[in-house]
Amino acid sequence: MFVTVLFGESQMEMFNINCKLIHFVHKLKERCGVDLTDCVDLMNRNGTVVNLEAKQLSVDLASSLLAERQHYVLLQVCRNDNNGDRKYISLLHNVSQRHPELKEPLRKVCNPGQERDKKVTSVRRGHVRRRGPAGHSCSKDACQQ
């Protein structure tokens, strides 16, 4: 049982989902080059966010949230400091060129009600550099509830 996660410059990694969510999320961050203290989530090809953030410390199996043999897009989760709302930033780049079928679902998730995504994100080995909108925190404490 596995899933494929898309991120970076058309990178993809396969993950076993027959493990506890807490271990799945840790390996997801580690293998995709995301800081372990950052919050991440996954979006399926239909534009549905899995909501890993709420269950990241769960001992339930990852297969309880993820569908076998499916592709997911890695998202960064940021919190609005003013009202606690979540904002998602896609960690998959060049979507329109390499994954045009994901362009519209990502736009709806990352920019609800907006025409175009104007944020700049980049993934580098070991950490994520991003520029979020004003009032949004992508800090280490953004995942704490």
Image (spheres, rainbow, N blue to C red):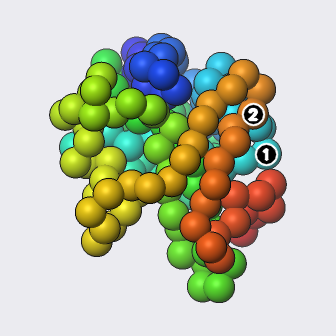
Give coordinates of residue 132: x percent, y percent. 61, 60
Query: Upstream in the sequence, badge 1 or badge 2?
Result: 1
Q: Which mark is residue 72?
A: none
Q: Is residue 45 visible?
A: no
Vertical relation: 70 (above or below) 41: above
Q: Which residue, given by chain and number where applicable, does mark 1 sit on?
A: 37
Asked which quadrant contains residue 96, the reply is: top left
- What residue is shown at x 52% (from left), y 38% (from top)? 91
Amino acid at pointer 1: Thr
Q: Nearer the viewer, residue 77 or 18?
A: 77
Q: Is residue 47 above or below residue 68?
A: below
Q: Residue at x 54, y 75 (%)?
A: 85
| Label at residue 127 | 2
In what element is the residue under mark 1? loop
Q: In the visual, does 116 lie left or right of 33?
A: left
Nearer to us: label 1 or label 2:
2
Q: Amino acid at mark 2?
A: His
Residue 52 in percent (x, y) is at: 53, 48
